[in-house]
Image (cartoon, rainbow, N blue to C red):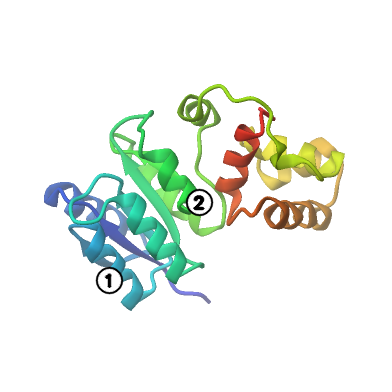
């Protein structure tokens, strides 16, 4: 049996950092292995402790959440990063997603939503609101990024951008689980995306959604 999901919490506000840590530690399947007060400390602790998930504020002193995300993902490709923001539309959020974050969460989210979000990104899923992402990116014209994709790969990418799970994609397109995974693997390779979150960004920037 695998152990609990190991989480590092990075937040410069001490009260919120303690509250988030206590919330996550109270769950049987989650374990907060460290707390960081700024991005530089988050990178150092993540590199040493290799957590499964880093929950980080996007605006922090010394090293902000974008740079911390980039450094953590470069050193630890298997570690997922979930960024915290005060607002649905934050100019830093898209930068964090491009740096390798698996999604973002509002600081005023319900406690259970925070717990569920950590579990979601740990499972390899992205945590993105298509509506909010559309506002972040803004209107875009179709770009060359999706040239070379097969029609079915394009269909899969469009559904990923609309927030569909693998099971929903399989049902909607009438394909098997193995075929769906093959298409997603091909999309990651062709679009140079690290994960599902970056596939969503690629779809929006290509004008698919």
Q: Earlier in the sequence, mark 2 or mark 1?
A: 1
Closest to the observer: 145 or 186? 145
Could you tell me residue 191's position as x and y percent? Answer: 68, 50
Closest to the observer: 169 or 70? 70
- Which callout, 2 or 1, points to the residue nearer the camera? 1
Residue 59 falls in image quadrant:
top left
Q: Which quadrant does the C terminus fall into? A: top right
Placement of 140 over or under 28, stated as above or below: above
Q: Is residue 48 left or right of residue 2?
A: left
**Which element carries disc 1, helix, strand or loop?**
helix
Crowdedness near tag 2: few (<14), some (14–19) or many (≥20) residues, C-alpha within 10 Å: some
**Contact, mark 2 vs mark 1 (Cβ under 8 Å):** no
Crowdedness near tag 1: few (<14), some (14–19) or many (≥20) residues, C-alpha within 10 Å: some
| Residue identified by numbered label 1 | 44
**Which element carries disc 2, helix, strand or loop?**
helix
Could you tell me residue 104's position as x and y percent? Answer: 41, 42
Q: Residue at x 17, y 58 (%)?
A: 37
Q: Residue at x 50, y 51 (%)?
A: 120
| Residue identified by numbered label 2 | 120
Among all residues in the image, which is located at the extreme top? 139
Q: Residue at x 19, y 56 (%)?
A: 62
């Amino acid at each position: 049996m695998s152990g609990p999901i190991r989480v590092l919490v990075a937040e410069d506000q001490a009260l919120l950092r303690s509250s988030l840590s206590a919330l996550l530690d109270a769950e049987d399947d989650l374990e907060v292995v460290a707390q960081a007060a700024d991005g530089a400390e988050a990178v150092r602790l993540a590199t040493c402790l290799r957590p499964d998930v880093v929950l980080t504020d996007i605006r922090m002193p010394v090293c902000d959440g974008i740079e911390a995300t980039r450094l953590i993902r470069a050193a630890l490709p298997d570690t997922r990063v979930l960024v915290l923001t005060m607002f649905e539309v934050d100019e830093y959020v898209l930068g964090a997603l491009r740096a390798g974050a698996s999604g973002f969460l509002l600081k005023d989210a319900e406690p259970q939503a925070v717990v569920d979000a950590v579990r979601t990104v740990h499972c390899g899923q992205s945590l993105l609101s298509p509506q909010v992402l559309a506002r972040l990116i803004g209107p875009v014209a179709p770009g060359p990024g999706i040239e070379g994709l097969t029609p079915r790969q394009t269909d899969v990418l469009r559904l990923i951008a609309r927030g569909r799970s693998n099971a929903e994609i399989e049902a909607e397109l009438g394909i098997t689980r193995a075929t769906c995974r093959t298409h997603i693997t091909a999309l990651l390779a062709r679009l140079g995306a690290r994960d599902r979150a970056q596939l969503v960004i690629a779809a929006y920037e290509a004008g698919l959604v």
